[in-house]
Amino acid sequence: MRRAVLALLVLATALPTLAATPPTAPKPRPAAVVQTPIAAPSVVLPAPIPLAVGRPGGDVTQCKATCARTLYFCQSSDDDSCGGRWAQCNAACTATYSPARLGR
């Protein structure tokens, strides 16, 4: 008798959960996609230009001293373009070795 009561209790608790879940139907498979060749030529974009990354800090004074030494020996000759070359060298030292300022 105890077994019968226990079986009825198990069935009473299990039936509502079994009735609440509908039977699952198998999911339909997606249709096979047929790829057609594209008549348009494919365009390959060039690689993007890399942005200026933080350059390692160097010795600005040593670079500018090299520019000054070059200017000194250049002025000992009769060359008129020494000042322009020194200005370019000095600007290159500043641009290359000075740390970039944030929030210009």
Image: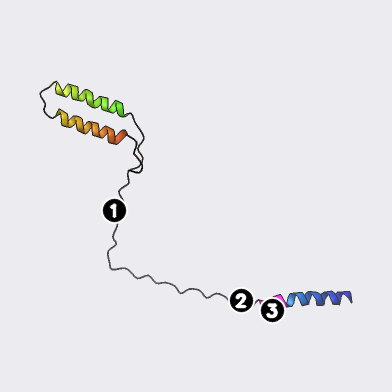
Depth check, front residue: 87 or 48: 87
Q: Which of the image's four quarters has the C terminus?
A: top left
Is the residue under label 1 in contact with that under label 3 (CB below 8 Å)? Answer: no
Depth check, front residue: 90 or 1: 90
Q: Which percent across, then down, holds residue 46?
A: 29, 53
Looking at the image, tell me whether mark 1 or mark 2 is earlier in sequence order. 2
Amino acid carrying mark 2 in the image: Thr
* Residue visible at 19% across and 22% down in the picture: 72
Is the residue under label 2 in contact with that under label 3 (CB below 8 Å)? Answer: no
Horizontally, residue 95 falls left or right of residue 79, namely right
- Residue 42 vertical position relative to residue 7 in the rendered view, above or below: above
Q: CA distance from mark 3 to mark 1?
A: 62 Å
Q: Is residue 20 magenta?
A: yes
Image: magenta residue range: 16-21
**Residue wearing tag 1:** 46
Identify the secondary structure beneath mark 2. Answer: loop
Depth check, front residue: 12 or 41: 12
* Residue visible at 10% across and 23% down in the picture: 78
Identify the secondary structure beneath mark 1. Answer: loop
Horizontally, residue 93 falls left or right of residue 84, namely right
Q: Which percent across, then down, holds residue 37?
A: 32, 69
Q: Is residue 47 magenta?
A: no
Among all residues in the image, which is located at the extreme right?
A: 1
**Residue wearing tag 2:** 24
Is the residue under label 2 in contact with that under label 1 (CB below 8 Å)? Answer: no
Looking at the image, tell me whether mark 3 or mark 2 is earlier in sequence order. 3
Q: CA distance from mark 1 to mark 2?
A: 51 Å
**Which mark, residue 19?**
3
**Which mark, residue 97?**
none
* Residue visible at 11% across and 28% down in the picture: 80
